[in-house]
Amino acid sequence: MSAQQTNKTPDVVVRGGSDSFKQQIAADKHRLIADEPVNAGGDDGGPDPYHYLLASLGVCTSMTVGLYARRHQLPLENITISLWHSRIHASDCEECETREGMLDRIDLEIELTGSLNDAQHAKLMELAAKCPVHRTLTSEINIRLRQASKASAS
C-alpha cells in the first residue's frame, strides 16, 4: 500500500516556484532552504541539493561513530567529517563494478580526536561505513514517482 493510499504524513515536503531555483523544505518541524549558487543561475540562498546529500551522509557518519564511542565509553573527543562530490570516468575507478561511462564519487575523510588506541580507532573507522545513510546510498534504491492526488496537492 502506498503512502498516498494510507494518508501518511510525508517525512519531507519541498515547495518552490518556477521563477527561481530556491526551494522551501519542511522536515517535520524544521524549515530549511535550498538553492543553486549564482554561477548556476540561483541566488545562493541555501545549500544546493548535492550539499544536502553530502551533509546527510556526514551527519549520519558522525552520529554513528559518536553513538558507538559513547556506548563503549571510548575516549573520543571530536569527530570531523569532510566530504567531496565529483563525477569520474568509470574506467578510472578500479574498485567500481561499473566499467563504462561516468559515475558519482563521494570522498569522505574522517578525523577522530581523543586518546584512542589503534584498535579503538580502527573499530570507529570500520563503523563509519555502516551508518544507515551510507548503507542506503550504496544499496539498491527504489524511488517511486507518481502524480499527487488532487486532494493532497494543496
Image (spheres, grey):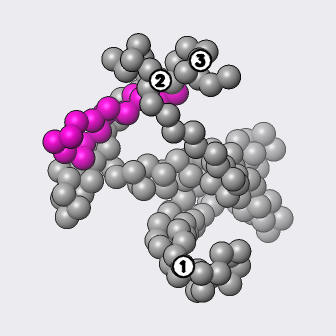
Magenta stretch, residue numbers:
11-26
Give me the C-alpha separation between circle 1 and circle 2. 38 Å
Give me the C-alpha separation between circle 3 and circle 2. 20 Å
The quarter of the displayed image where residue 143 is located = top right
Query: Residue at (55%, 21%) from the top-left corner?
Result: 4
In the picture, the disc for residue 101 is 1
The relative height of residue 150 versus residue 79 in the rendered view (above or below) is: above
Callout 3: helix, strand or loop? helix
Report x, y in % for residue 137: 63, 54
Q: Earlier in the sequence, mark 1 or mark 2?
A: 2
Quadrant occupied by the N terminus: top right
Is-magenta flag for residue 84?
A: no
In the picture, the disc for residue 123 is none
The relative height of residue 103 versus residue 27 in the rendered view (above or below) is: below
Q: Amino acid at mark 1?
A: Gly
Query: Residue at (55%, 14%) from the top-left corner?
Result: 7
The relative height of residue 33 versus residue 5 in the rendered view (above or below) is: below
Callout 2: helix, strand or loop? loop
The residue wearing badge 3 is 5
The residue wearing badge 2 is 28
Callout 1: helix, strand or loop? loop
